[in-house]
Image (tube, rainbow, N blue to C red):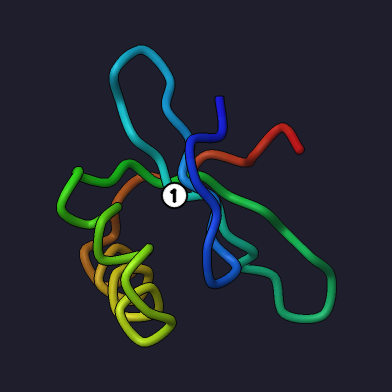
Amino acid sequence: MIVASAHGVKIIKENDTLYARYDRGEIVPEFVDVEISQIEADRILKSEKDAYSVIINTQNENRPLKKAMS
C-alpha cells in the first residue's frame, strides 16, 4: 500500500516493512523497490535533496532491489 509520495519517490508499506519505489531507468523507465527505514522515509518526505541522498545511499550500499509491480 502506498503511504506517501514525494519528490518522485513513493513510500510503500508491505507487512510492516517500508520500501522506496523510484525510477532507476535511464532511457526506459524501470521502477524498483528498495527497503528503507522509517528515518529514511521521513528524509524522503523532507526535501528533494534529502530524497535524492537516500536513494543514492541505498544504491551505494548495494541494497537488494526488486522490480516494482507498477
Residue for point 40% across, 46% down: 34
Measured from the top left, where is residue 26 in percent x and y?
72, 79
Q: Looking at the image, how many numbered discs can be counted on the residues?
A: 1
Residue for point 44% across, 49% down: 20
User: Is 8 left, or right, of 14 in this rendering?
Assistant: right
Outermost residue toward the left in this view: 39
Outermost residue toward the bottom in this view: 49
**The C terminus is located in which quarter?**
top right
Which secondary structure, mark 1? strand
Establish if 30 lies above or below 33: below
Outermost residue toward the top in this view: 15
Residue for point 27% across, 46% down: 36
User: Is 64 left, or right, of 61 in this rendering?
Assistant: right
Measured from the top left, where is residue 51 in percent x and y?
38, 73
**The N terminus is located in which quarter?**
top right
User: For this rendering, which residue is in front, 21 or 6?
Assistant: 6
Outermost residue toward the right in this view: 28
Kindly indicate the quadrant of the structure image that contains residue 16: top left
Disc 1 marks which amino acid? Ala
Determine which residue is flagged by label 1. 20
User: Is 68 left, or right, of 70 in this rendering?
Assistant: left
Establish if 38 lies above or below 14: below
Measured from the top left, where is residue 18 in percent x and y?
34, 34
Measured from the top left, where is residue 50 in percent x and y?
30, 79
Kindly indicate the quadrant of the structure image that contains residue 24: bottom right
User: For this rendering, which residue is in front, 37 or 25?
Assistant: 37
